[in-house]
């Protein structure tokens, strides 16, 4: 059934308090819930309808008396609920160890965990499981003392002790009213890293990171990240921690990255555990940003939450924005900040742009869904974050902070909407570029699709004017034929052809500056700059000031000026990407093999040899555009042609810059111990890229030195970043040494699940050669370490192939699609959320070239034919078929 945003109705009842008692048993857990309930007088009189899924109801009392009730589908209905406030007591059981969906209460590694967002609480007990019903929770956990020595829930520990010789209990109380999706409990044999900290306000807090025995030394980075997040949120937004105790717990079986349950965040171990020997620089960064993300949710999500799930981006877009700002501030130098920004934009282009042009395209605030779990998407999260960034661009940093203060002043303790957020930012900044056009700006919430922005400039030498014409086009998306123009902030600067900064002065204005933000709000607008001394090179959309696809029509010569001289590091990078993209697209469109020209190679050489650019920047500048982003530029997508062009570009860059790669490799070796700071991780990234280029080149030249050095480095590496980098270089281009290295890697790390995930993922992503990569994935399904039940493991192999290895996946014989259909169905029987995510792979079947298109459609139809699909997969598949 389709749920529509416009059908929102306030709840007929409020649940003020809830007292939960759990008798924890893996096979059958007994849950007793006592609630204080009040009618919502603003809503028509009606029955009490509680959500409940896969529960066994044992008792239902109102004010201590039994009451008649009905069970209708997944609802418990009490027709004769009193008018006055009343007490409801319910008792039910659930079966945690049989719960493979990892939603609700489940067991993992012999411990109990919960995941309640979005609608998992109803799998634990009957409730008004919707975010606008906020209650104060008291929770008592009772369990076997030996098996479950640690008993945790939200808030503060009131009491704990023994029940009898074998069982004990703990009683928790969370003083903050919260929606049920923020409830959590954990029970198990865990150990904690602890740290006491004092905030600026002078309050003391206990921070704890709970993990399985043996993992404690891998929690230092998470603890440091947590402390840094606390400090940052107080400094930047004046938002302190509001609880005496803040707990973080790791679990190996988890559908997502992590969850912001009040005072008791639960993390996928992949987003929590790190040691230099087992985690890469990328992992360290990801952990820092996810720990921050969940911590920041305490204000943006928990203190102010969502009225309904259509408002999900209210908390997710805003919290992603906050974690991105945090990561940039942590990075430090301007260049390291730019590298962060570039990584975020790459991610947006790789995942969100394709989503926005595919079958599942939806606005940042969706209008309808049938399964909310399908809408924890790149659009809601990452485009949502870009929307928040545009607020900041339009009102300025200080203005944005004022807006945030007003937001909390107005809405602390409430469940609100995206409109409420927009209004607070605008009201705090009267007369700002945002407030003047707030209604139009809010189209970012309601219109799906990536706007196309075209920019063309005309220089008038005699008048010394430069006229920039901006045109936007908003292509149709499913259910949205015609769209209105968006409000697009375009940050820009002008450079002379020699690369000097040209001052900007708009006609009719006295203000002169080096950078400005133009606001495009109509389909087409022109902006005239005066006093422009020479023909300028425009640097547009600096810092990626809006989530659009830009066509700036710049020539190679102009792009080269930007690559060499732009003061905006993002656009410097972008110019290099554009040069590469143009060449790849020309080859793909013409169907001719790619042949890199001297000018391009020279430009890349200049970046690599540049005396001032740092290693991290060089590495991202020398990395070619991703295949998914390339596909976004094409009306008809031939994944093999794209892959062939990218691979050819790589091979040619490897050969042409061989000497420079050697220099880069040698110059970026790090002596001494491992730290994941931006400077050292940048050096490791560049050294890894150089090494992979040298091994790639050796494949053609027959050189044996570099493959040998790569193997040696793989063996001797002092950290996982270098070890995995060397291994990837071999897997990429030296089949023989790769076999030996993979075997050795497995042997070394066979007891560390997160590292074995990397081992599977690397093989799932191996570039296709004669069908071998695909065959290997099929073989690995039979590997004793492989299981579909653990989401990280399933993702490491299957998602790697289907989502990140287009050349192995899109096969003329359709075997990749057959594989996909099989795995979607197999996963759906275990874990619909993970299956739904995999189903998304076919979002864009409709733009594939033949023979892929027809074969992909057949595979989608095959899945659609299964009668008992989960609502998750059913929704994705139905949308895919509708996009024909
Ligand atoms: N709120 C969590 C986060 O972004 C993600 C929870 C996702 N849950 C889900 N069922 N899809 O940090
Ligand atoms: Zn989040």
Image (cartoon, grey):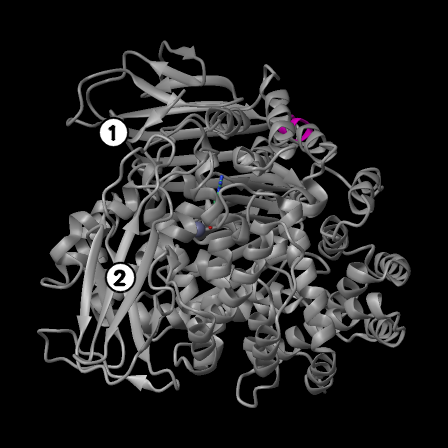
Mark toward the viewer: 2 or 1: 2
User: Which x, y percent locates residue 380?
Assistant: 40, 46
**869 or 288: which is nearer to us?**
869
Please name the residue that numbered disc 1 is placed on: 6
Q: Residue at x 36, y 68 (%)?
A: 233
Q: Does label 2 or label 1 sit earlier along the sequence?
A: 1
Please name the residue that numbered disc 2 is placed on: 489
Left or right: residue 836 versus residue 178 is right
Q: Residue at x 47, y 76 (%)?
A: 560
**535 or 237: which is nearer to us?**
535
In the image, farthest residue toward the front: 462
Quarter assignment of residue 732: bottom right
Q: Secondary structure at mark 1?
A: helix
Quarter assignment of residue 558: bottom left
User: Which x, y percent locates residue 235?
Assistant: 33, 74
Above or below residue 165? Residue 620 is below
User: Which x, y percent locates residue 867?
Assistant: 59, 14
Residue 216 visible in rendering: no
Quick check: marks 2 and 1 in contact, CB under 8 Å?
Answer: no
Label 2 lies in ligand 2 vicinity (Cβ under 8 Å): no
Measure how far apart labels 2 and 1 are at the Cα level.
Answer: 29 Å
Q: Magenta segment, which residues?
A: 825-829
**Quadrant placement of the N terminus:** top left
Above or below residue 879? Residue 554 is below
Q: Residues within 10 Å of mark 1 (few under 14, many from 20)?
A: few
**276 or 150: which is nearer to us?**
276
Q: Residue at x 73, y 48 (%)?
A: 764
Q: Is residue 738 magenta?
A: no
User: Which x, y percent locates residue 582?
Assistant: 52, 61
């Amino acid at each position: 059934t389709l749920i529509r945003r416009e059908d929102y109705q306030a709840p007929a009842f409020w649940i003020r308090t809830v007292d939960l008692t759990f008798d924890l048993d893996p096979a059958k857990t007994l849950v007793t819930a006592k609630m204080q309930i009040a009618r919502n007088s603003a809503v028509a009189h009606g029955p009490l309808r509680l959500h409940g899924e896969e529960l066994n109801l044992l008792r239902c009392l109102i004010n201590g008396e039994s009451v008649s009730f009905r069970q209708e589908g997944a609802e418990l209905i009490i027709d004769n609920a009193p008018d006055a406030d009343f007490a409801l007591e319910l008792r039910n059981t659930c079966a945690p160890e049989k719960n493979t969906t990892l939603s609700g209460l489940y067991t993992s590694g012999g411990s109990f965990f919960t995941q309640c967002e979005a609608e998992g609480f109803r799998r634990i007990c009957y409730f008004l499981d919707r975010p606008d019903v906020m209650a104060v929770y008291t929770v008592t956990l009772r369990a076997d003392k030996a098996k479950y020595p640690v008993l945790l829930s939200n808030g503060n520990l009131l009491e704990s002790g023994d029940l009898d010789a074998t069982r004990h209990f703990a009683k928790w109380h969370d003083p903050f009213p919260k929606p049920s999706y923020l409830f959590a409990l954990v029970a198990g044999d865990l150990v904690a890293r602890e740290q006491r900290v004092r905030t600026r306000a002078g309050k003391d807090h206990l921070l704890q990171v709970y993990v399985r025995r043996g993992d404690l030394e891998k929690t230092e980075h998470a603890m440091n990240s947590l402390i840094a997040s606390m400090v940052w949120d107080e400094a930047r937004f004046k938002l302190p921690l509001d609880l005496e105790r803040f707990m973080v717990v790791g679990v190996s079986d988890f559908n997502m990255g992590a969850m912001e349950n009040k005072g008791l965040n639960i993390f996928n171990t992949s987003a929590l555990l790190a040691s230099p020997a087992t985690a890469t620089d990328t992992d360290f960064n990801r952990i820092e940003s996810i720990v921050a993300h969940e911590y920041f949710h305490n204000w943006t999500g928990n203190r102010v939450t969502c009225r309904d799930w259509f408002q999900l981006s209210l908390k997710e877009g805003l919290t992603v924005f906050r974690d991105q700002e945090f990561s940039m501030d942590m990075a430090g130098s301007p260049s390291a900040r730019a590298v962060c920004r570039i990584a975020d934009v790459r991610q947006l282009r790789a995942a969100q742009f394709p989503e926005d042009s595919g079958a599942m395209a939806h606005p940042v605030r969706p209008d309808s869904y049938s399964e909310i779990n399908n809408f924890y998407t790149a659009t809601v999260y990452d485009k949502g974050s870009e929307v928040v960034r545009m607020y900041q661009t339009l009102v300025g940093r200080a203005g944005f902070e004022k807006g945030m203060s007003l937001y909390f002043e107005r809405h602390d303790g409430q469940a609100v909407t995206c409109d409420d957020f927009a209004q607070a930012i605008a009201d705090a900044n009267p007369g700002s570029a945002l407030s003047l056009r707030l209604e139009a700006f809010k189209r970012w919430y309601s219109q799906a699709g990536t706007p196309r922005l075209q920019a063309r400039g005309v220089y008038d030498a005699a008048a010394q004017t430069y006229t920039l014409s901006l045109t936007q086009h908003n292509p149709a998306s499913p259910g949205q034929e015609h769209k209105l123009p968006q409000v697009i902030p375009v940050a820009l600067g002008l450079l002379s052809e020699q690369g000097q900064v040209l001052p900007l002065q708009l006609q009719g204005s006295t203000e002169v500056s080096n950078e400005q933000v133009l606001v495009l709000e109509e389909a087409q607008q022109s902006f005239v700059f005066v006093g422009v001394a020479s023909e300028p090179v425009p640097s547009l959309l600096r810092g990626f000031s809006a989530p659009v696809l830009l066509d700036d029509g710049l020539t190679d010569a102009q792009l080269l000026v930007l690559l060499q001289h732009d003061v905006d590091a993002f656009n410097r990078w972008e110019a290099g990407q554009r040069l590469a993209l143009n060449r790849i697209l020309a080859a793909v469109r013409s169907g001719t093999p790619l042949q890199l020209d001297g000018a391009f190679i020279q430009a890349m050489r200049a970046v690599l040899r540049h005396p001032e650019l740092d290693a991290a920047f060089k590495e991202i500048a020398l990395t070619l555009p991703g295949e998914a982003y390339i596909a976004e530029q094409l009306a008809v997508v031939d994944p093999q042609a794209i892959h062939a062009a990218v691979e050819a570009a790589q091979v040619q860059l490897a050969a042409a810059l061989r000497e420079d790669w050697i220099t880069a490799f040698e110059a970026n070796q790090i002596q001494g111990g491992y730290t994941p700071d931006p400077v050292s991780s940048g050096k490791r990234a560049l050294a890894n890229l150089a090494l992979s280029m040298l091994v790639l080149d050796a494949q053609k030249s027959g050189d044996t030195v570099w493959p040998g050095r790569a193997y040696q480095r793989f063996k001797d590496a002092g950290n996982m970043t270098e070890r995995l980098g060397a291994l990837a270089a071999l897997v990429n281009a030296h089949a023989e040494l790769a076999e030996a290295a993979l075997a050795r890697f497995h042997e070394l790390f066979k007891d560390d699940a997160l590292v074995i995930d990397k081992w599977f993922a690397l093989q799932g992503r191996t570039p296709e050669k004669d069908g071998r990569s695909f065959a290997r994935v099929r073989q690995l399904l039979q590997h004793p370490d492989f299981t579909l039940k653990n989401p990280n493991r399933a993702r490491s192999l299957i998602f790697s192939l289907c989502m990140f290895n287009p050349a192995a996946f899109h096969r003329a014989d359709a075997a990749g699609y057959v594989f996909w259909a099989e795995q979607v169905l197999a996963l759906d029987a275990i874990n619909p959320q993970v299956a739904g995510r995999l189903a998304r792979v076919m979002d864009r079947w409709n733009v594939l070239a033949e023979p892929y298109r027809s074969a992909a459609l057949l595979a989608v139809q095959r899945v659609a034919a299964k009668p008992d699909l989960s609502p998750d997969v059913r929704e994705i598949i139905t949308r895919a078929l509708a996009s024909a």
